[in-house]
Image: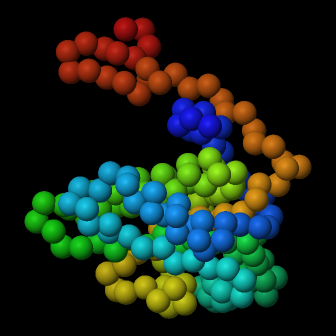
Amino acid sequence: MNVEQTVLARRSATRLTGPGPDDRELAELVELAMTAPDHGRLSPWRLVVLRGDERRLLGEAMAEAAGGEPADRERTAAKPLRAPLLITVVLCPRDHPKVPRWEQLAATVCAVQTLILLLHERGWGSVWRTGALTDAPPVRGVLGLADTEQSLGWLYVGTPDARRPAAPRPPVDARSKLSSLLAPVGPGA
């Protein structure tokens, strides 16, 4: 695939099965993803890889944080088991005179998006899941997050379920997102 085909074909894969990329391939893809825009080359992020029983530990922490009825806690605890590989995205902002926190967050998101595209190009499926539990104290504890770090959620990664093909992407009028200081660019211009 070329870049344009990869971008156009990529969809969040909500149904994933095994296998997922092994540690060698994942490290290779992360190294490539680190070429994403990053002012100051701070790499203000890290990734926590969860496989096997590590996913159960995360699920238990999520269930503890969610509380509720036993059946609800059980459903919450099972969420990390929906993919063979979970990658926790952790923002690790640093004090820097020229690179504010928002720009470090942007660099982190650029690296993750690049990783998502690389995974897709290699045939892996992924979906970035977030929510109220991403930064809950029990979850932070099991992930070993420092006080200055913030969990931005998880990439669920694996083999896309062939029985659930990706839905077509609805067309978007990009002109509605464009403007100019001197003349309209969008629809009706």
Q: Quadrant of residue 91?
A: bottom left
Residue 96: x and y, percent? 15, 68
Tell me the colour scheme of the image.
Answer: rainbow
Say which residue appears at 44% left-offset and 13% top-offset: 187
Question: In this orientation, does residue 168 appear?
Answer: yes
Q: Is residue 22 depicted above or below 171 in this figure?
A: below
Q: Residue furthest right?
A: 163
Q: Is residue 112 depicted above or below 79 in this figure?
A: above
Residue 82 lies left or right of residue 115; in this view the side is right
Residue 60 lies left or right of residue 97; in this view the side is right
Q: Quadrant of residue 9?
A: top right
Q: Is residue 39 depicted above or below 135 in this figure?
A: above
Residue 94: x and y, percent? 24, 73
Question: In this orientation, does residue 72 appear?
Answer: no
Q: Is residue 119 depicted above or below 101 in this figure?
A: above
133, 115: nearer the viewer: 115
